[in-house]
Amino acid sequence: MCAIPDCPNPPARGPHCWGHLKRKQRRKPVHEALAEKYESPWHRFVEATIAYNDCNSEDDRAFERVRDNLRKSAMAYVESVIAKRNRA
């Protein structure tokens, strides 16, 4: 398991999982918990939509980040629907 306490992920390279290794490379706090994974692309899209609605549009940087997350989550949801149809 990852060297960070309570992290259930397997180590990627060295003692850290990919998520904590990426944080270390970006010089961000390594000992914080990773963001929870979403149940499905639909749940990710719903959460991104709510965050977009709640975002303060006066903060341009935060608004761009939330809008980009909404765009990415919408694309992931559409891709999951297409993949599901192709399997059927």
Image: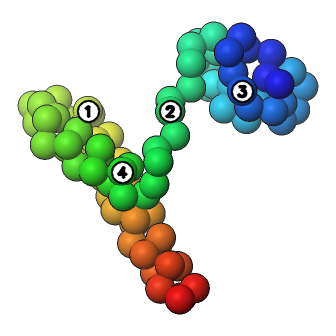
* Disc 2 to disc 1: CB gap under 8 Å: no
| Residue type highlighted by circle 4 | His
| Residue type highlighted by circle 1 | Ala
- Mark closest to the chain's N terminus, 2 or 1: 2
- Mark closest to the chain's N terminus, 1 or 3: 3
- Mark closest to the chain's N terminus, 4 or 2: 2
Q: Residues within 10 Å of mark 2 (few under 14, many from 20)?
A: few
Q: Residue 27 or 54: which is nearer the viewer? A: 54
- Mark closest to the chain's N terminus, 4 or 3: 3
Q: Identify the residue at horizontal 12%, vertical 31% (top origin).
A: 56
Quadrant in the picture for residue 40: bottom left
Can you tell which mark lies on residue 8?
A: 3
> What's the CA distance linking mark 3 and mark 2?
12 Å
- Mark closest to the chain's N terminus, 4 or 1: 4
Closer mark to the observer between disc 4 and disc 1: 4
Can you tell which mark lies on residue 14?
A: none
Residue identifier under label 1: 62
Q: Residue 81 or 30: which is nearer the viewer? A: 81
| Residue type highlighted by circle 3 | Pro
Question: In x, y percent, where is residue 34?
Answer: 56, 26
> What's the CA distance linking mark 4 and mark 1?
21 Å
> What's the CA distance linking mark 2 and mark 1?
20 Å
Q: Identify the residue at horizontal 36%, vertical 58% (top origin).
A: 42
Residue 68 appears in the figure = no
Residue identifier under label 4: 43
